[in-house]
Image: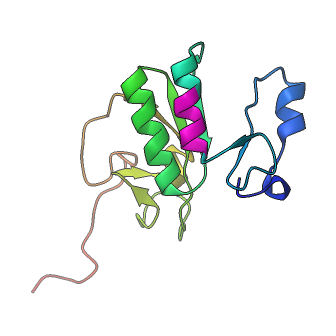
């Protein structure tokens, strides 16, 4: 988080028995620094069994790279503007995956197996029809 006031659900996660490491960019709570920097430091210390992140795309990319580098199971929660919410319009596509249908939480390491590719592999029962008649 940027500041201690921006932190959410820390007590809830701790109540679940999760190890929670807090980091703020201004140092007002927990470790000083970006969450990705703190994750890297924790990986260096050892004992990390999995990574999970939500936040801006830059953070998600950094955490995904750390998961691959350290061979640690990693999931990220992505945000996207959604028009239809059922996977037809493609407005929420990120890296070839639909946030509304396949997410919002994605396993990024180990990489998930992909189904047979097609124009809309998540909707195999639909036929792609042109909007304007030919001719």
Left or right: residue 32 compared with residue 61? right
Range shown magenta: 35-41
> Residue 103, can we see it?
yes
Image x and y of residue 123, in percent: 39, 49
Question: For the point 25% across and 36% down, which residue is it?
Answer: 116
Image x and y of residue 60, in percent: 50, 47
Q: Is residue 40 above or below residue 28?
A: above
Image x and y of residue 126, in percent: 36, 54
Residue placed most toward the observer, 81 or 133: 81
Image x and y of residue 20, in percent: 76, 30
Left or right: residue 12 compared with residue 52? right
> Residue 110, can we see it?
no
Q: Quadrant of the C terminus?
A: bottom left
Q: Residue furthest left?
A: 135
Residue placed most toward the observer, 109 or 133: 109
Residue 40, magenta (yes or no): yes
Colour scheme in the image? rainbow
């Amino acid at each position: 988080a940027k500041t201690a006031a921006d932190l959410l659900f820390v007590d809830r996660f701790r109540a679940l028995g999760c190890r929670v490491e807090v980091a703020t960019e201004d140092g007002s709570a927990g470790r000083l620094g970006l969450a990705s920097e703190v994750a890297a430091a924790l990986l260096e210390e050892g004992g990390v069994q999995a990574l999970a992140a939500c936040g801006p795309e830059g953070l998600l990319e950094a955490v995904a790279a750390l998961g691959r580098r350290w061979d640690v199971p990693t999931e990220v929660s992505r945000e996207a503007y959604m028009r239809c919410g059922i996977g037809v319009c493609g407005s929420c596509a990120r890296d070839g995956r639909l946030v509304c249908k396949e997410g919002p939480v994605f396993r990024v390491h180990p990489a998930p197996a992909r189904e047979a590719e097609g124009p809309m592999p998540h909707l195999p029962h639909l036929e792609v029809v042109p909007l304007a008649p030919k001719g």
